Image (cartoon, helix red, strand yellow):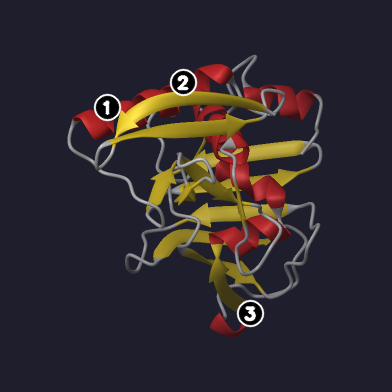
Amino acid sequence: MIIETSKCASYGHREFRLSFDPSKALRDDSRVLQEFLESSVADGSRYVPGQTLQVGWIINRIQETQDGLLTPCEPDFSSLPIAWDESVTTTLSHLRLQKDTCSSFGIEVLHFPSMLQSGLVGVDVISGLDGIVMERLDATDDTDSGWFLGSLQSQCDYADPAMLRRCSLYELAIQIPHCIQFLALPIGSRVECCESMIQFELQGAPIAALPESLVARLIQKPDL
């Protein structure tokens, strides 16, 4: 684990510490987050322990370390209720994964939901499911991400509300981790994904992954 430290003013001069594992997240992405924190403080933002901060789709909680520093802590993505780790490794790696997935289809503007928002899930979706179908519709309210996830092999009629359940995207990500990379795709997106295939549509029109993009490489050598 590498620790990078930057100084930011927050109710007086407080130091922000960002911790991440360089084998799982890029230093360049860490520097972008560091620069955001510094610029937001310069623009008047103040961070205090217990405050939350959304980075990408992940909610981070600001905590104070034993040596008096402020540090963003992220969910461990294994616990319900949420347990917090003093790290931004997962935050940065998900941000990069979602950015590269969107870029694979020529989408440069990311549409992040919040991990606390809900999605609709087929009742037959179980942990470890390989073949999934995802579709993002208009959200019904601020608590709704608009995302639906079902099984590609489903025998259920997902048009029947009795065949659906609602859960947070955080809970869904724990259950079906390979859905995470698609969550920043825009409204109108539809994804069909299994071990050897990723198909994408936007507003009903199929879009192929760009050559040499992340998704193109995953299709050639699946590792979802």
Q: Residue at x 47, y 48 (%)?
A: 64
Q: Nearer the viewer, mark 3 or mark 2?
A: 2
Q: CA distance from mark 3 to mark 2?
A: 44 Å
Q: Decide: marks 3, 1 in contact (CB < 8 A)?
A: no
Q: Is residue 150 above or below residue 49?
A: below
The mark lying in front, picked from 3 and 1, is 1
- Tell me if residue 6 comes above or below residue 188 in the rendering: above
Q: Position of residue 220 (x, y in %)?
A: 78, 24
Q: Which residue is mark 3?
A: 163
Which of the marked residues, 3 or 1, is nearer the chain's N terminus?
1
Locate residue 68, reporting x and y percent.
Answer: 46, 42
* Circle 1 crowding by C-alpha within 10 Å: few under 14, some 14–19, many from 20: few
Q: Quadrant of residue 215?
A: top right
Amino acid carrying label 2: it is Arg
Place of residue 136 in the rendered image (x, y in percent of width and height, measured from the top left) = 47, 54
In the displayed image of the protein, which residue is found farthest to the top? 212
C-beta proximity under 8 Å, tags 3 and 2: no
Viewer-closest of 207 and 186: 186
Observer-nearest residue: 29 or 142?
Answer: 29
The image quadrant that residue 33 belongs to is top left
Where does label 2 land, which residue? 31
**Visible residue check, residue 216:** yes
On screen, residue 183 versus residue 15, left or right, reads: right
Farthest bottom residue in view: 162
Along the polypeptide, which appears first: circle 3 or circle 2?
Answer: 2
- In this rendering, is residue 95 above or below 182? above
Residue to which mark 1 is pinned: 39
Q: Is residue 187 among what the camera can see?
A: no
Secondary structure of residue under mark 2: helix
Q: Which mark is residue 123?
A: none
The three-letter amino acid code for the residue at tag 1 is: Ser
